[in-house]
Image: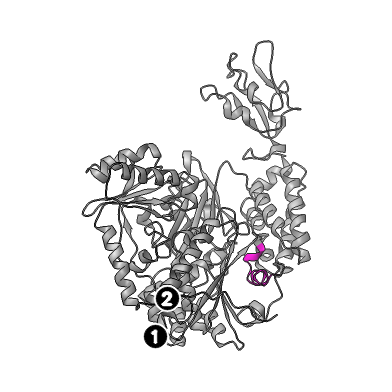
Amino acid sequence: MPARPPTRTSISPQMTFDQIKDQATSEWEALQQKPHILVGTATCGRAAGALDVLSTFEAEIRRQNIDAPVVPVGCMGLCYAEPLVVIIKPDNFSVCYGNTTSESVRRLVEGYVVGDDPCFELALGTLEVADENAPSIPELPRFEHELRHILRHCGYINPESINHYIRRGGYSSLIKALGTPQQEIIAEIKASGLRGRGGAGFPTGTKWGLCHNASGQPKYIVCNADEGDPGAFMDRAILESDPHSVIEGMIIAGYTMGTPHGYIYVRDEYPLAVKRFKIALQQARTKGLLGNNLLGSDFSFHIEVAEGAGAFVCGEASALMYSIEGKRGMPRVRPPHSVESGLWGKPTLLNNVKTFASVPMILDRGAEWYASIGTEGSKGTAVFALAGKVAHTGLVEVPMGTTLRDLIFQVGGGVPKNKKIKGVQIGGPSGGCLPESLLDTPVDFDSLTKVGSLMGSGGMIVLDEDNCMVDAARYFLDFVQKESCGKCTMCRLGTKQLLDILVDITTGKGKIEDMDLLVELAEDIKEGSLCGLGHSAPNPVLTTVRYFRDEYEAHILEKRCPALVCKELIAYYIVPEKCDRGCEHCVLTCPTEAIKSDEKRIKIIDQTKCVKCGNCQMVCPPEYDAVIRVSPPSAIPQKN
C-alpha cells in the first residue's frame, strides 16, 4: 500500500518568531498585571465539578464587575484535591485552593480577589508561579520532594492558548533546532541519556540515530499516546494540559529525520485530550509553526491525529502502526524493527508522549543539564500516576533514583487511616507487585527490573493491609488476558490457564502443586510471546508468588484469605453482644433477605442466602460495630 501522507492544511506565516513572541509576551504580561484565577479543567477536575466552579467564578466576577480574568488550565497533579483553584495577585501571595465548591467561590472572590484575606482556611498552600520556562517552585509540602520538568506547564497555562506556551519558552527549541545540523541534534539527545518513557526504556538518541540512518522514504514520526493501563493517566494529563510540548517535540523529531509526516495515536476514550490537541495543532498552523514551510523555511511538517478504539495491545509499536494503517492491531515478528520498517513498511520513529515532551527542554537547557538529573543508567525524571491506597493521589514527577518509600510517603502522603502498606504495583497491569520490604528500591529502569518489576509507562497502585495479593494478581491477570490480541498461543491460552488457576485458589479450590505450575507456566508465556504484553503479563503472578507466598499458602492449605477479600473464603457474622436490638439497618439493606431477627431480636445471617456483598457491615452504626468478617467461613459459631 502506498504511503498516505497526513492532511496538509497550513496557513502561511505573516510574522517572524520574534514577532510571535512579542505578541505572546504582550498577552501574558497583561494577564500578570491584574488578579486572575486559574481553574483546573482537565478530566480529573471536571469529574469533581470544576466546570461548575469555573462558571460560578465567571458569573461572580461579572456580577461584581471585577477586572480579574478566569483562566481554564490543565491538571496540576493534585487530583485528590480537585477541583483546584489558584488565585494569583501581583505583588502578593499566589494561593492554591483544593476541593473548591461553587458555594465557596463568593468567599474567595470577596476575600482575596477583591480584598486582602487569602482565605487560608480553604487553601492547600501558597506557591510561586514562574514567569519564565523554568518549573514553578510551590510552597506546598508535596512539591518540595518533586522536580517538575515534563509537567512544568501543567496547571499553570491555558492549554488552548499557544501564547501562554510561547511566553514560557515554548517553540524556542524548535527555532534553535531548525538552525542546527540533524546529527548534532541526535548527538545532543544521546548525550542527555534520555530513555523512552513508554515502558521499554530504549535509549532515545540511539533510536533517533538508527531511524535517521535507515534507508527508505518517506519516513514517519509517530507519537504513542495509547495509554491503557488501569490507574494510569500521565499521557492524558499532558495532552490535556500542555499539548504544545508534545507537538514541538514531534516537529523537532520530524526535522531531525528529514520528514514532513507525523501521526499521534490516541485512544478515543480521551475526548478532551483529543479536542485540546487538535486545537493546539490548528493554533500552531495559524502561527506558521506547523504545516508547509515552517516560518518561511524549507522544512514542512504535518501531524494527523489517529484515534484508536481502545485495544490495550495497540500500545505495542507494531500493533499501533497496523491500527493506523486500518488493519487489526496485532504485533508482528521483529526484526525488522520499526526504525527500518514501520508504518507502511517505511522507517518510522515512534516515541511516547513523555519522551517527545522531554525533547524541547533538552535542546533548550542542554544535554549536560538533563544528564545531571537521575542515576547513572536512568537520566532525568519519572512521571507516575499515583493511585490506590495513598492519601494524595494524582500525578507526581520525581528525579530518577527516588525511592518508592519517599515517593509514596513524602510525595503521596502515605497510606490513609493509619493502615499498613502491604505492597505497590508498578508498571501497569503487567508490572510487578513489590512488598513493603522493597520500598527502598530506587525508581529507575534497572533497579525495578532487578526486583522483578518494570518502570512501564508510569502507573503505580499502592496496596494496603486490606488488599489480598492473590486477588490482586487475579485482577491484573484478568485484565491482560482479556486484552490479549490472541495471535500468540502462549499468550492467548497461557494467560487463560494462569487465570483459571488463580480463580481456583481464590475460591478455595487450589492445590499446593498449583504454586509450581503457576511459575512454570508464567515463564513459558514470557518466552512464547511476541510482544511486550505477553512478555510481561505474568509479572503480577511471578512477583506475588515470590514475595507473598504465605498468602497463597493460606488460601490453598487453610482455605483462608488473610485480607478477608476473597468472597468464597469469608463469611459475615453478627456479634450478639454488640448488636442493638432496635436497629434494623442491616435487615433493610440486605439484598437477599439473608438477615433475620431471633426471638431476642438479635440479628442472625443465613449463610446459605448471604452473597457477601458487605452492605450489612457498611451500614452497621460505628458505635455498635456488630458485623465482622471472618475467614475461613468455618470460623463463625455454628448458630450463625
- First to last magenta residue range: 313-326
Residue 443 visible, this angle: no
Q: Is residue 34 left or right of residue 475?
A: left
Dot 1 or dot 2: first in sequence order is 1
Picture coordinates of residue 220, whole percent (x, y): 58, 79
Other residues around mark 2 within 10 Å, as few (<14) / some (14–19) / many (≥20): many
Q: Main secondary structure of the magenta part?
A: helix
Residue 353 within the magenta-colored segment of the rendering: no
* Location of mark 2 (residue): 288
Q: Nearer the viewer, mark 1 or mark 2?
A: 2
Residue 332: quadrant of the picture? bottom right
Q: Which sits in the foreground, 514 or 444?
A: 444
Q: Work out whether 363 lies above or below 586.
A: below
Residue 269: quadrant of the picture? bottom right
Measuring 69% from the left and 77% from the top, which residue is drawn there?
A: 334
Cα separation, mark 1 vs mark 2, equals 17 Å
Residue 579 visible, this angle: yes
Measuring 39% from the left and 85% from the top, which residue is drawn there?
A: 179
Q: Which mark is residue 553?
A: none
Q: Is residue 390 left or right of residue 471?
A: left
* Location of mark 1 (residue): 179
User: In what element is the residue under mark 1?
Assistant: loop
Picture coordinates of residue 377, whole percent (x, y): 48, 72
Picture coordinates of residue 539, whole percent (x, y): 64, 59
Hey, what amino acid is under mark 1? Answer: Gly
User: In what element is the residue under mark 2?
Assistant: loop
Which color scheme does this rendered protein use?
A: one colour
Q: Which sits in the foreground, 264 or 25?
A: 25
Residue 571: quadrant of the picture? top right
Hey, what amino acid is under mark 2? Answer: Gly
User: Which quadrant: the N terminus?
Assistant: bottom right
Residue 318 within the magenta-colored segment of the rendering: yes
